[in-house]
Image (cartoon, rainbow, N blue to C red):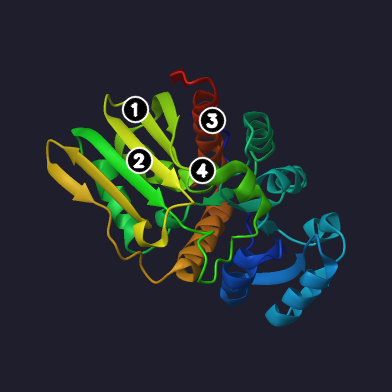
Amino acid sequence: MSTAPKPRPHSSSAPLRVGLLGTGSWARRVHGPALAAHPEVRLVGVWGRRPEAAAELAENLGTRAYDDADALIADVDAVAVALPPDIQAGLAVRAARAGRHLLLDKPVATTVAAARELADAAAEVASVVFFTLRFSTATAPWIAEQADAEGWFTGRAEWLGSIYAPGTEKPYEASPWRHEKGALWDVGPHALSVLLPALGDVTEVSAARGPEDTAHLLLRHASGASSVATLSLTAPDAAGGVTVELRGAGGVATLPKVWGDGPLDAYANAISALLTAARTGVPHACDVRLGLRVTEILAQAERSLHDGERVTT
């Protein structure tokens, strides 16, 4: 990954003024409550594509609804985005060009061009991409420990969801972008966010289709290690779950089954990470440059799925 300029520090010790862009399930259940509760944040307002949803969420969070996204961007120091990736990318570019720090969701975009434009725009602001396991209290230390270890030979990641299975509440069942882009783009970023720190950057990708939206990725890493990832949103309920296993000279390491205290606490940690990056000017490891690299790798995997060829990244 290329080295970007350090962002300009946010010198104020006052609470960071943040605007929330998005009103969907994740915004209602995680982004909004975590921002409203964070002691070093002032949630200035909420904007959404549906004004009535923005008004309802703003009332629940004790803040103001904005009718215009740029008006909210003008009133804050940072934006938190809870929108489909290709809507997120355009708004985040506008916010970054206005000098606002960015707390983004994954993937940052689903095209390399959009992700690269965003990374270029965000070169002088702080950014954090919310790869959940990189901020969860149980998994983040495990990932850091594996990144420090040497001699990994191979890795395996299985991210099997069942968001369309009948019989239980599925908050993402109606998500248009997930229907269109599938597991590769929804849970693929999570798998890469764990594999890359331990095994290094990806140098080759090949991919094969499985049942429905299932994708199988074979990855070659800069360290010489290889890994496989199986990704699905359409697995049977009984088959769902997440497994990450690394094997090497030191033995076998397995991702903890319990991921800390849940997404609210993980997102609170991501907020704190953005605050630190904004105040010190030191980029976070999960900044928009990592978001760009993940998009590049997934785009190559998508190409391999389409063409049936191995792709050098």
In this orientation, does residue 127 appear? Answer: yes
- Give the Cα separation between the discs numbered 2 and 3: 18 Å
Name the residue beneath numbered marker 3.
Answer: 302
- Residue 193 in sight: no
| Disc 4 residue crowd, few under 14, some 14–19, many 20+, Cα 10 Å | some
Disc 2 and disc 1 in contact, CB within 8 angstroms: yes
Is label 4 in contact with label 3 (beta carbons under 8 Å)? no
Q: Residues within 10 Å of mark 3 (few under 14, many from 20)?
A: many
Give the camera-side residue of 194 and 93: 194
Hey, what amino acid is under mark 2?
Leu
Q: Is residue 77 left or right of residue 311?
A: right
Of pointers 4 and 3, the one earlier in the residue sequence:
4
Q: Which residue is mark 1?
A: 221
Instruction: Name the residue at 57% across, 69% down.
Output: 30
Q: SS class of the residue under badge 3?
A: helix
**Looking at the picture, which amino acid does disc 1 mark?**
His
As drawn, the label of residue 213 is: 4
Q: Mark 2 highlights which residue?
A: 195
